[in-house]
Amino acid sequence: MSRRADLRRLVETKNGLVVPGAYDGVSARLVERAGFPAVYMTGYGTSASRLGLPDLGYAGLAEMADHARNLAAAVEIPLIADADTGYGNALSVRRTVQAYEAAGVAALHIE
């Protein structure tokens, strides 16, 4: 079963999920080892850990998708990821979704 299917099943069968945030592969593995059903890639955590900067738009789509790929590869549980504003207009949002999907993200949110 795919991680997207796993997450869909969890959402459909639970009254809510606690999904801790992770900022790198090690913290994602800690979330998994603690027994949580999914892990969340934070925008601030990504920007701070990769760039040493706050989540103010410094990290672009390529950096965020690459970071998501690393987190998804580190764990077996579904990854939910922050996709910021989608990185542009409607066409950019489509590209963002495709990049995150290719990175192994099970779900994303756009602000």
Image (spheres, rainbow, N blue to C red):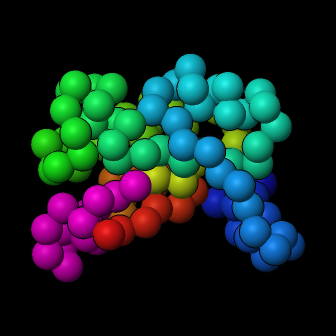
Tell me: 101 left or right of 34: left
Query: In this picture, is 46 found above or below 3?
Result: above
Place residue 83 in its image quadrant.
bottom left
Locate residue 110, reporting x and y percent: 35, 68
Instruction: Report if residue 63 is visible in the image.
Output: no
Tell me: 9 left or right of 70: right
Residue drawn at x 46%, y 52% is: 81
Was residue 15 drawn as part of the magenta stretch in this picture? no
Residue drawn at x 43%, y 46% is: 42
Tally the marks. 0
Instruction: Report if residue 49 is visible in the image.
Output: yes
Tell me: 32 left or right of 66: right
- As drawn, which residue projects farthest toward the right? 13
Locate residue 57, reporting x and y percent: 15, 50
Locate residue 89, reporting x and y percent: 14, 75
Query: In this picture, is 3 found above or below 92?
Result: above
In depth, the one of 84 and 68 nearer the eye is: 84
User: Which quadrant: the C terminus?
Assistant: bottom left
Residue drawn at x 76%, y 43% is: 36
Place residue 72 in its image quadrant.
top right
Residue drawn at x 81%, y 74% is: 15
- As drawn, which residue projects farthest toward the top? 26
User: Which quadrant: the N terminus?
Assistant: bottom right
Q: Which residues are magenta?
A: 82-96
